[in-house]
Image: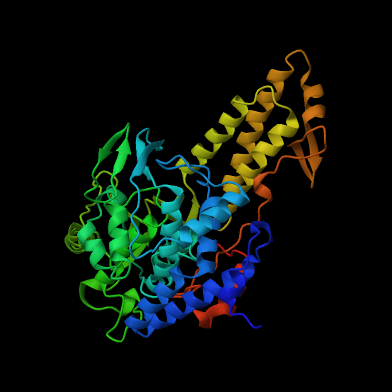
């Protein structure tokens, strides 16, 4: 007897034996159809396909797996105190989700928690129950391909296939100096004040015709803090799976303020635009954005008023304390990078390096690990520090970070040397060196353990030039499978910066 894919996957009972690739392919095929229908502006077909996806058993399995097994908050419970960390519990959750109708679903209130911010303040989070998070993930799987076909080309935060390096690469391309050409040199480094907390619910719901009642329920669910219920009148809960997507939907259109598209919908470069939009570029990453313009007056008299009007309709406003206008020679920080133009020896060059704050934060984190592990073995130190050092270095590998990497390695060596001397204050420095430091790859004084494992050094990471995502390209586009397959293989060119 022949079975459809839905009938076949329903027979799956053992969580550990699920063929996840089959389910991913099934979900991705429907998402590709949603993306194509959106491009064709066939809105009735988009709506039908989205409803088909949320009813799919494959989508339920994928949603449960991402929330309870892959996400970092899988062990964080909502107000019901329930988490699902065993295979049996996840199977039961799938069955529970199957009985819920996403179109008529009623969610539970959020649990209020606070996490520290870099400036010493605390960021409020609203934690939904695991069941609510799975339902949000299910709706996100249906909404995301539609909006990926509608989002602007230079929006990079919380989007599939895009990351911070895409935004940084676009900034470098926009403001770098070229011989014989004049580029825009003034930069508005803008920040939206409490973006997630102030989004106007009425405006947001107008932009989401499908699942409107469900999303309204999440927005109006309320928060329980210290046993007291508080009504939510604005904003999307930071801590919800779907919140970043909703924030991007609310902010969609900011780049189009400056004439990025022709009447036929094709992208227009800043140099080909006319009027006050000529030479103006906007790059956005979530609620942080950079606007590059030909003059300071263009920013103060034209760009800022338009952005303020755009945000006011959505219930938001600019953070005046964090919004600055600078020249590219003075440099500015964005997403942990310092972007600055340098002049010397008859040439000008735009360099992108790890920002001073990012370096200090990284070194402070290393110092904290060593301070909390004064009695640990060298093997434990290597195991704890290597992921931190490697992860930080890989984030900045697509920048002019070679000198910074060397400086960071030197500072880490200083901290490790003090850590070693403190442990053996009755031993000579030569003895300490022979015990804890060795040579590898032509490099001396590399921290090592008795088991022969060495500390990873940041300078060993090769500096490469990043290949930015092209224009409106999306991983949901069925016509671009080869393009995204090539990107996931990591084929990038070596840096010529």
Residue in the image at 27% along x and 38% along y: 229
Residue 400, given in percent of the width and then of the height, sits at 55, 55
Task: Tell me where residue 195 appears, x and y as whole percent.
Answer: 29, 51
Foreground residue among 473 and 494: 473
Q: Position of residue 190 (x, y in %)?
A: 30, 53
- Image-quadrant location for residue 299: bottom left
Outermost residue, top side: 426
Residue located at (30% from left, 87% from top): 264
From what the image shows, is residue 132 above or below residue 425?
Answer: below
Q: How many marks overall?
A: 0
Q: Is residue 5 visible?
A: yes
What residue is drawn where x is 41% and y is 71%? 148
Q: Is residue 157 above or below residue 76?
A: below
Q: Residue furthest front?
A: 1
Looking at the figure, which quarter contains the C terminus?
bottom right
In the picture, the quarter occupied by the N terminus is bottom right
Q: Nearer the viewer, residue 270 or 116?
A: 116
């Amino acid at each position: 007897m022949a079975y459809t894919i839905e009938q076949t996957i329903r027979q799956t009972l053992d969580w550990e034996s699920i063929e996840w690739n089959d389910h991913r392919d099934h979900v991705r095929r429907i998402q590709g159809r949603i993306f194509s229908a959106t491009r064709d502006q066939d809105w009735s077909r988009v709506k039908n396909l989205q409803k088909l996806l949320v009813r799919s058993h494959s989508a339920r399995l994928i949603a449960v797996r991402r929330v309870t097994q892959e996400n970092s908050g899988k062990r964080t419970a909502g107000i019901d105190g329930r988490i699902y960390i065993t295979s049996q519990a996840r199977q039961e959750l799938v069955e529970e989700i199957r009985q819920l109708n996403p179109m008529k679903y009623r969610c539970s209130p959020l649990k209020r928690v606070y996490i520290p911010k870099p400036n010493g303040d605390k960021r409020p989070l609203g934690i939904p129950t695991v069941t609510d998070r799975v339902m949000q993930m299910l709706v996100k799987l249906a909404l995301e391909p539609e909006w990926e076909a509608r989002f602007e080309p230079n929006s990079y935060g919380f989007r599939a296939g895009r990351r911070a390096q895409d935004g940084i690469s676009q900034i470098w391309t926009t403001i770098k100096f070229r011989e014989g050409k004049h580029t825009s040199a003034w930069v508005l480094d803008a920040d939206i004040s409490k973006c997630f907390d102030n989004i106007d619910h009425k405006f947001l719901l107008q932009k989401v015709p499908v699942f409107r009642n469900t999303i309204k329920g999440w927005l109006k669910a309320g928060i329980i803090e210290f046993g007291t219920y508080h009504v939510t009148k604005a904003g999307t809960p930071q801590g919800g799976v779907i919140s970043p997507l909703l924030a991007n939907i609310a902010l969609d259109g900011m780049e189009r303020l400056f004439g990025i598209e022709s009447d036929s919908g094709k992208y227009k470069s800043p140099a080909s635009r006319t009027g006050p939009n000529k030479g103006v570029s906007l790059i956005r990453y979530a609620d942080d954005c950079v606007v590059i313009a030909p003059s300071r007056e263009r920013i103060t008299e034209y760009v800022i008023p338009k952005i303020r009007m755009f945000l006011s309709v959505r219930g938001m406003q600019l953070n005046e304390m964090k919004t600055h206008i600078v020249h590219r020679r003075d440099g500015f920080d964005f997403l942990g990078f310092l972007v600055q133009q340098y002049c010397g020896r008859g040439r000008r060059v735009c360099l992108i390096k790890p920002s001073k704050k990012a370096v200090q934060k990284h070194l402070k984190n290393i110092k904290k690990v060593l301070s909390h592990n004064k009695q640990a073995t060298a093997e434990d130190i290597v195991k704890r520090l290597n992921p931190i050092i490697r992860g930080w270095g890989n984030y900045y590998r697509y920048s002019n970070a070679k000198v910074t990497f060397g400086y960071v390695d030197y500072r880490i060596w200083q901290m490790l040397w003090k850590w070693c001397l403190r442990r053996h204050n009755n031993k000579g420095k030569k003895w300490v060196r022979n015990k804890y430091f060795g040579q590898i790859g032509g490099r001396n004084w590399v921290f090592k353990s008795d088991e022969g494992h060495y500390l990873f050094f940041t300078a060993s990471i090769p500096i490469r030039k990043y290949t930015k995502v092209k224009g409106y390209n999306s991983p949901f586009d069925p016509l671009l499978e080869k393009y995204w397959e090539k990107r996931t293989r990591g084929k990038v060119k070596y840096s010529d910066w």
